[in-house]
Amino acid sequence: MMIDKGREKMATTLERVQAGMEFLDDIRPGWRGEIERTILDLGSQEDCILGQLYGHYMDALPLIGLYGDRKRQTAYGFELTGEQLNAWNHQEDYDNLTAAWEYMLDS
């Protein structure tokens, strides 16, 4: 049986984003209203979810208890997986992560 890796990867990404949304719901109620969808870009430290909420991705991490915790940053869909980050060109992966956030925000 052939497994569709792209579909499987997207399902996993959507699960990570769902976990991130639930995390943000717990620590910052109403955060969804602060997201400017027209500039949302998970590849940008200012225009990603955390960048929009806290000014910059790196500024957000200590404020929300994720500084130095790459595993949870990834598990919540705020960052790419280690495998994706090690890829030569990971812009497509950031585009897919952005699309996953957009999709979940519409759900």
Image (tube, rainbow, N blue to C red):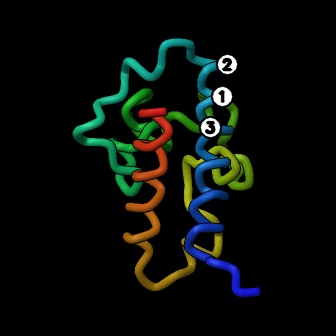
Residue pictured at 37% horizontal, 21% vertical? 34
Asked whether 92 or 79 is in front, the reply is 92
Q: What amino acid does circle 2 point to?
A: Asp
* Residue 22 appears left or right of 1: left
Q: Amino acid at mark 1?
A: Glu
Q: Nearer the viewer, residue 70 or 49?
A: 49
The residue that appears at 52% across and 82% down in the rendered structure is 87
Task: Estimate the x, y position of residue 51 in percent, counting from the top left.
Answer: 40, 37
- How much space separates mark 2 and mark 1, taking CA atoms? 6 Å
Across and down, in percent, residue 18 comes to 63, 39
**Quadrant of the rendered structure where residue 39 is?**
top left
The residue at which mark 1 appears reads as 22
**Crowding near pointer 2: few (<14 within 10 Å), some, many (20+)?**
few
Q: Residue at x 62, y 77 (%)?
A: 5
Amino acid under label 3?
Answer: Gly
Circles 2 and 1: CB atoms closer than 8 Å:
yes
Which residue in the protein does label 2 denote?
A: 26
Left or right: residue 62 versus residue 60 is right
Relative vertical location of residue 4 with respect to residue 38 in this rendering, above or below: below
Question: Which label sits in the foreground, 2 or 1?
Answer: 1
Pointers 2 and 3 in contact (CB under 8 A)?
no
